Amino acid sequence: MFNKKTIILIVLVFCWYSLTLCPPGISDASSGEKPRLGVWITVFSPEKVLHSKENVDDLILTCKNCGINDIYIQIYRADEAYYDSSLTDRTHYEEMLAETNEDTLSYLITRARKNDLKIHAWINLLSVAQNRNANVLKKFGRTALTLDQHGRSSMQSGNKDELDKYYIRENQLFLEPGDKRVRQYLADIAEEIVRKYPGLSGLH
């Protein structure tokens, strides 16, 4: 067994070795390109980026000052749209629209392009979190969920049996990726996003 001092020494040597071989901020010699920096903006961010044009402008300025090239903005989670959707629940989008009277995602894309930044739509596909009223479940029913051999979802519950010792249940629901209806539904969501926001640099 290694003692505490030996472990600390190994960690320090590893860190020195890693920094010597891969110092931060240098170009990839093989491609000649500088590394790209990205930031992920969640819908739970206290700054509420898409709730005002001023917040969007602050994000753009922060990214420019920090050398960030790519912004990954979360606009779809738990089968809820934070963009102009006609396919699923757009309550959050309507709330933002009421505050700003403008589609701030479109505004973000426009402002980012003028500042040489790329915007990627961050979408969470298979998780519907704890949203038992998700549109996809209203449409296809409980069979659209990933279920175990006893017909139980991945959501934690009080009903446990011997098999539960082999895996941990998450406190959220997941859609079944093997269900063709689910795959088509999610493909339609992705297609809607890129069609309505052609200025996006990608889907994440």
Image (tube, rainbow, N blue to C red):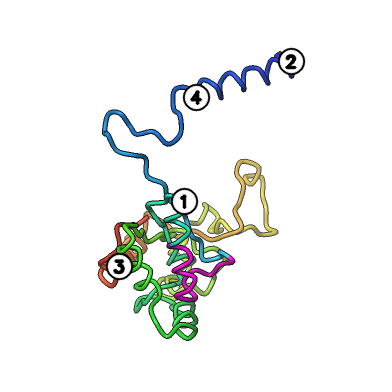
Counting every numbered tag in the picture gives: 4
In the figure, 25 relative to 122: above or below?
above
First in sequence: mark 2 vs mark 3: 2
Q: Is residue 51 above or below residue 31?
A: below
CB under 8 Å between callouts 1 and 3?
Answer: no
Magenta-colored stretch includes residue 49: yes
Please identify the quarter of the rendering in which residue 6 is found. Answer: top right
Crowdedness near tag 2: few (<14), some (14–19) or many (≥20) residues, C-alpha within 10 Å: few
Circle 2 — which element?
loop
Going from the N terminus, do you reach mark 1 or mark 4 first? 4
Disc 2, disc 3: CB below 8 Å?
Answer: no
Mark 4 residue type: Ser
**Alpha-carbon neighbours of circle 4 within 10 Å: few (<14), some, or many (≥20)?**
few
Front in this rendered view, residue 47 or 82: 47
Badge 3 crowding class, 10 Å Cα cut-off, few under 14, some 14 to 19, many 20 or more, is few
Q: Identify residue for label 3.
A: 188
- Quadrant containing the N terminus is top right
Give, as a single range, the part of the protein colored magenta: 46-60
Disc 3 element = helix
Q: Amino acid at mark 3?
A: Asp
State how far apart marks 1 and 4 are (Cα): 23 Å
Q: Which residue is mark 4?
A: 18
Tags 1 and 2 in contact by the CB under 8 Å rule?
no
Q: Is residue 141 magenta?
A: no
